Every structure is written in C-alpha cells, then in structure tokens.
Amino acid sequence: MVSLLHSLLFPLIPFVYSSVSSCPKCGTMDVPYPLSTKGSCGNPKYKIHCNKTEGLEFISSDGFHYEIININSTANRLFIMPPLIKEDTCQSLDLPVGGFRIEDDSPFYVSSRNTILLLNCSDNILLSPLNCSSNSICRQFEENESKCMDLLCCSFLKDASMTNHRIRVRVEGCTAYTSVVDMKPGAPFHLWNFGIELQWLSPF
Ligand SMILES: *[C@@H]1O[C@H](CO)[C@@H](O)[C@H](O)[C@H]1NC(C)=O
Ligand SMILES: *[C@@H]1O[C@H](CO)[C@@H](O)[C@H](O)[C@H]1NC(C)=O
Ligand SMILES: *[C@@H]1O[C@H](CO)[C@@H](O)[C@H](O)[C@H]1NC(C)=O
Ligand SMILES: *[C@@H]1O[C@H](CO)[C@@H](O)[C@H](O)[C@H]1NC(C)=O
Ligand SMILES: CC(=O)N[C@H]1CO[C@H](CO)[C@@H](O)[C@@H]1O
C-alpha cells in the first residue's frame, strides 16, 4: 500500500512542487513565496523584479523601480526605499509619474505603519487631514534635507481612512515625499526608519 501510494504520488511531486516553489535568490536576497521574479516560480500576481546588479526591485504600476531593502515573509511585508530627491531640487524622482502607485487589484498595499512626509506643498492642499503646522515632524526632515527647507510641508499617518494604493505627488500639490515606518513620537532624527512598508495579502 505504501509503495503503491508512493508510486502514485512520486510522479506528481515535481509538478506540484514547481507550481508553489519559491524563486531562486536574487544576488544575496531570498525571494520567498509568493513573490515572483519570473514566470516559472512564485505566484505571478506577486511580481517583483530581480536586477542582477541592483538587486530586488518593486515596480509601480507606472513602471517606476523602487529598491527593495528587505522582506519579511512571516509578516507578509516588504520594505522599499523611498524615491531619491533630485539633486538641487525638492522633487522626488517619481514626480513625473505622479509618485507611488499600485493597481487597485494588486495584492500589495501601503501598510498603515507609514508616516508620509510631503514636501514643497502649495497651500491649496491644506484642507485635507494633513498636519502642515509649524511643529509637524516634516520640519525636522526639512532641516536635514536643505533642498526642501522653508517650503510648506505636511505629514500624515497612512492609516485605514485613506487609499493605500498610492502616495501622490504633483506640481502645484507637493513635489516630493518620503516615508518613515513605525514613527515613535519624539524619536530623534537619526532613529527614523526611512522606507515605505508594503504589505501583501496571502494568495488564498
Ligand atoms: C539593472 O539596473 C540598471 C541600472 O538601473 C539598468 O541599467 C539595467 O538595465 C537593469 N537591468 C535589468 C535586467 O533590469
Ligand atoms: C517579521 O515580522 C514579525 C511580525 O511583525 C516579527 O516578529 C519578526 O521579528 C520579523 N522578522 C524579521 C526578520 O524582522
Ligand atoms: C516646488 O514646487 C514648485 C511647483 O509646485 C516648483 O516650481 C519648484 O521648483 C519646487 N521647488 C523646488 C526647490 O524644487
Ligand atoms: C502636528 O504634529 C505635531 C508633532 O507631532 C503635534 O504636536 C501637533 O499637535 C500636530 N498638529 C495637528 C494640527 O495635528
Ligand atoms: C544629520 C543632520 O543633519 N541632523 C540634523 C537633523 O535635524 C536636527 C534638528 O531637527 C539637527 O539637530 C540635526 O543635527
């Protein structure tokens, strides 16, 4: 009986295995299931990009590449680098595509642990639930990022009350942004955990 079972199951194993297998490492980084760097592994809905020289990258729905800093597959989270701010300006490199955006039907979303700092804002955005006061934490960032100094800035927690599929920047709105994960009130600047934390829904 055991050997009959074995002979029945054995030919199936390679097939079953390949349909749920995780992808090979990208450089030194593991690519845990369901993340997928190519069609033959992972789950295709969880596509990320392996650039052999740059490492793992998350690609937004506008085609902008964000470096993946680390992945926690237990918590279904990945942590990406906010876009750089263009030299001598206060403009995020992804400003031309309107900032960070993922499709509404994507299993990835911006987690509610991100505090977003919007920089170089114009006054017409003051109505929203943003903290643009002179003691907003974005002021501390400005002081450490001189290109954005003395321009209007705002901060907010990306919580459940707003869309978790985009961080918007635009000319005549705010032209740059960054994000701090798990911001503790009063934490000194050098302890801020800069990055955008994305979470993914399990594939079942
Ligand atoms: C890897 O990234 C570099 C620098 O951004 C780019 O020039 C190159 O085309 C990328 N390669 C792949 C395979 O994506
Ligand atoms: C992954 O996330 C879980 C849950 O938040 C946490 O307990 C664990 O320490 C994290 N693992 C790593 C390697 O950070
Ligand atoms: C701030 O934004 C305005 C457009 O809203 C832009 O013209 C200006 O160059 C930006 N400032 C900097 C320092 O990038
Ligand atoms: C803005 O943030 C600062 C610093 O966290 C806080 O002291 C202040 O009460 C906030 N203001 C508003 C209007 O939320
Ligand atoms: C590295 C750096 O520039 N740190 C500065 C950040 O801003 C605070 C004030 O909010 C300064 O005290 C730090 O020196």
Image (cartoon, grey):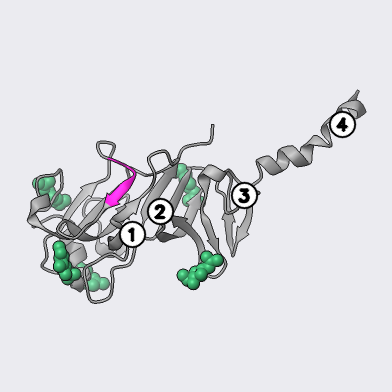
**Range drawn in magenta:** 163-167
Residue 202, how many percent across, how many down?
Answer: 51, 36
Question: Mark 4 sits on what residue?
Answer: 6
Q: Main secondary structure of the magenta part?
A: loop
Give the residue type that dot 4 points to: His
Do residues under tags 2 and 3 come within 8 Å of each other at their CB atoms? no
Along the viewing direction, whichever of 39 and 113 lies nearer the viewer: 39
Query: As drawn, is 18 to the left or to the right of 201?
Result: right
Determine the residue positioned at 42% across, 61% down: 65
Question: Mark 2 sits on what residue?
Answer: 60
Give the CA distance from mark 1 to mark 4: 51 Å
Q: Which mark is residue 194?
A: 1
**Quarter of the image holding residue 99?**
bottom left
How many neighbours does mark 3 have within 10 angstroms: few (below 14), some (14-19), or many (20 or more)? few
Is 166 magenta? The answer is: yes
State which tag comes first along the sequence, 4 or 2.
Answer: 4
Question: Mark 3 sits on what residue?
Answer: 39
State which tag comes first along the sequence, 1 or 4.
Answer: 4
Give the residue type that dot 1 points to: Phe
Give the residue type that dot 2 points to: Ser
Give the residue type that dot 3 points to: Gly
Residue 176, how many percent across, how many down?
Answer: 24, 62
Is 6 magenta? The answer is: no
Q: Determine whether the residue tagged by mark 3 lies in a helix, strand or loop.
A: loop
Q: Determine whether the residue tagged by mark 1 lies in a helix, strand or loop.
A: loop
Give the CA distance from mark 4 to mark 3: 29 Å
